[in-house]
Image (cartoon, rainbow, N blue to C red):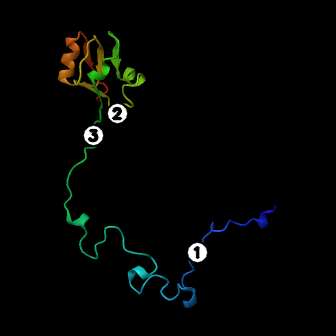
Amino acid sequence: MNLGSLIAPKGARKKRKRLGRGEGSGHGGTSTKGHKGQKARAGGYHKRGFEGGQMPLSRRLPKFGFTNPFRREYTVINIGDLESIPGSTIVDETYLKQNGFIKKLNSGVKVLGNGDVKVPLTIKVTKISETAKKKIEAAGGKVEVSTAAQA
């Protein structure tokens, strides 16, 4: 067998449509593009959002809103998620990341009060809600809010 004798199996290859090669080809004359007009010309059609010369919707509607460039995105965790942590553990951002409680650190960690904690924990985070703080202190734990990570 040599490379020159290889032949594709029947039906594996389709003949390409040869446009504009005379009336006898079946695709002559207008080359399957209909008659005249913008869509028949080279260069295709009009751009996205074009409404035939009418003022497009994107320009008719007013601009609104504001994106704060200084916005801080906190990684949120509930105290109910901290139930499995043994007592008297110091829980900080690195501990939470190493033990799989959070996937990534944005601008710090905020602890919310959804759930209950039964063991005393020392929690060192960027932000904490009032209900979470009360529940942790009621269980005999301590809360330290680090302002260094906020700056």
Foreground residue among 78 and 15: 15
Q: Which mark is residue 106?
A: 2
Identity of the residue drawn at 24% across and 74% down: 54
| Residue 10 position within the rendered picture, expressed as x and y whole percent measured from the top left | 66, 68
Quickly name the residue at label 3. 70
Q: Earlier in the sequence, mark 3 or mark 2?
A: 3
Q: Secondary structure at mark 1?
A: loop
| Residue 53 position within the rendered picture, expressed as x and y whole percent measured from the top left | 27, 76
| Residue 43 position within the rendered picture, expressed as x and y whole percent measured from the top left | 45, 76
Q: Secondary structure at mark 2?
A: loop
Quickly name the residue at label 1. 16
The amino acid on which the numbered mark 3 sits, given as a three-letter code, is: Phe
- Residue 98: quarter of image: top left
* Most distant residue in the right direction: 1
Identity of the residue drawn at 34% across and 33% down: 106
- Residue 151: quarter of image: top left
The amino acid on which the numbered mark 1 sits, given as a three-letter code, is: Arg
**Cα gap from disc 3 to disc 2, whole angstroms:** 13 Å
Foreground residue among 136 and 124: 136
